[in-house]
Amino acid sequence: MTRTPKIVLLTLAVSAALVGCGKTDTPAKDAAASTPAATEQATAYTLDEAKLPAYNAFQASDLDSKLDACGAFGDYVNGKWLAANEIPGDRTSWGAFTILDERSVAVQHQLAEQVAQVKNPNHIEKIVGDLWATGMDEAKINAQGIEPLKADLAAIDGLQDKAAIADYLRTSAAKGENILFGFGAEADFKNSAMNMAYASQGGLGLPDTTYYTDAKNADKLKAYQAHVAKVLELSGVAAGDAAKQAEDVVKFETRLAKASKSRVELSRNVELFYNPLTLADADKLTPNFSWTEFFKSQGVAAPEKFSLAMPGFHEEVSKALGDTDASVWRAYLRFHTVDGASPYLADAFVQENYEFYGKTLNGQKEQKPRWKRVLGTIENDAGEAFGQLYVKVAFSPEAKAKMEELVKNLAASLKERIQGLSWMSDETKAKAIAKWETFTPKIGYPDKWRDWAGLQTQRDSYLGNVRAANEFNYKFNLSKVGKPVDKTEWGMTPQTVNAYYNPLQNEIVFPAAILQPPFFDPKADDALNYGGIGAVIGHEMTHGYDDQGARFGPTGNLEDWWTPADKKNFEGLTGKLVKQFDQYKVDGQAVNGHLTLGENIADLGGLATAYDALQKATAGKEDPKVDGFTRDQRFFFNWATVWRTKYTAENAKVRLATDPHAPAQFRAMGAPSNLPTFAAAFQCKAGSPMARTGDQQVVIW
């Protein structure tokens, strides 16, 4: 429920989603076998299509005839639409993904209103209905004020020494409220069939370490300090004291930031997450914070080893427990406790939370309406439960069958591309193919739904329900430590407009909500589907061979399966892609080609693979030419349409610093500019921006 540093692991580093980080919550270990047709659901739900937002599919009228496709291709396809459409006030970006997300949210809205009215709900319906009803009861939430946090704040006020602080960190973590660091189960990097415990860095309220250390972010750090002071005031601290405490909190977080790894470092070196130690060795490393006691307090049996990721961070926390005054710790814990709970408290807390995180940090012009915020809470805390209802009304068997065919075709084309590589030896190719043979696709929704028995929700407290779900999810996650990995689990909900690759299971996952236009339409022609979801499928498969995914073998274990010469060749090619994206700029600020490398590799390989698959699928078929455009041209048109996105200026800055995905306008043009097939489709002359040649052209997978 708080913005706690949940265990980030592969979500940030390798398990690449298209536009955002995947969820870190994981299903229960004893999920009951079922399909959507066999769920606990008893109520028949209806969907009014007329009330849903329209799709944003490609249309020939979108093209700007005044521009040249061989110039800025993204502007040629999307410029007119971007100029004609403003970012909604409650959004920080707007485009193909967010429009489809609006549609998914609209479906969820209709469902939530119906679920909350069910007279005799089953367990899934009760969870969703209780979260919805209590979240929408603004009058009760305002009447309760900060009362739901009184016990927590009293406990924090009583902390007088390092022993008491360490004990509080343990007890709050056991309730799923770990403010300081992430802790949870994930597959062992060296034995991916088994789960082990990981502890990761965290504890920061700003998006990245650079917000504390770089002079260019000084204004945001100052605004954050003012926000900390305001939240402390709202919690009952006198204004003068709140200002002093806020200064202490920011200094403390700056100290943690200097001991933490940046987003760039985490995104490009997956081994930072893997540092297996015994509990005894970990205890020596952090003498003021016992990991032996921590595991005991979380109800996790003492393991032979666990991963103490980013050990420098944990060493600094231990030092801070010994040398930082308890008053600073109290201010830090009080702020984060209230700040994390603010979205579920009275209006004053909600508004302040929006003013900083939404408006100041990301340029959001207005707060999302309450119903959207409550749906976001359900998604975070009980998303897969809600997904059981979503797929019954919003996903067809026809769509799943068509997707299975596309995945099969893309896989065949990827294999041929690997086999045809000129820069890779036969020895490494054989291992790349061995990995290809173990790819597992997941489409639409889980074959086995998570079991939500044990989560008890009521109609009396919104924050109470959120906290109950938070603790339930945390304990479910911890129950997997030391157990075999359940390969049926999903890391995203069916209603999520996204996709991801998980290297530890070598799986590609496509939730139901992304399988709609402009990505996918069972009734659309091949050109659009291969340029949309086909390229997405290729993208996720190629993540298995990007600079981090390629470090994992066929079984999902972290291993070195490259010859030294092949590895050197690969790094030379990826270095060229880094340079290409370093040259792109947003309002004068350069894109970080190193931060975005994995996604750029996946775009390049995915688009090339999708094009190959399209040629196979249409071999011997006459090109129908729609609106005067060839099949190949329309393939690339839909690729660009997928990346039709605009951002607020503030959000663009945050993304440039933290997002492993390049800005959408450069994804529209970056990969195709390296493909001779694009230049041929539009008859681009050598030297034009979209016809890179010689050393400027990048060909990897």
Image (cartoon, rainbow, N blue to C red):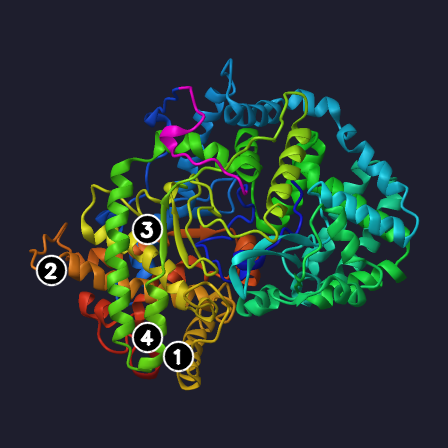
Disc number placed over residue 573 in the picture, else none: 1
Residue under label 4, please give it.
430
Q: CA distance from mark 1 to mark 3?
A: 35 Å
Q: Position of residue 465 (x, y in %)?
A: 64, 29
Residue type highlighted by circle 1: Leu
Q: CA distance from mark 2 to mark 1?
A: 31 Å
Residue under label 3, please give it.
80
**Observer-nearest of 151 and 48:** 151
Residue under label 2, please give it.
619
Q: Nearer the viewer, mark 1 or mark 4?
A: 4
- Residue placed furthest toward the right: 160
543 left or right of 229? left
Q: CA distance from mark 1 to mark 4?
A: 20 Å
Label the magenta part by its dominant secondary structure: loop
Secondary structure beneath dot 4 equals helix
Quadrant housing the N terminus: top right
Quadrant housing the C terminus: bottom left
Local crowd size for mark 3, using a 10 Å CA cut-off: few (<14), some (14–19), many (≥20):
some
Q: Nearer the viewer, mark 3 or mark 4?
A: 4
- For marks 1 and 4, the one nearer the N-term is 4
- For marks 2 and 4, the one nearer the N-term is 4
Circles 3 and 4 in contact, beta carbons < 8 Å: no
Q: CA distance from mark 3 to mark 4?
A: 47 Å
Quadrant of the rendered structure where residue 460 is? top right
Residue type highlighted by circle 4: Ala
Residue 57 sits above or below residue 71 on the image:
above
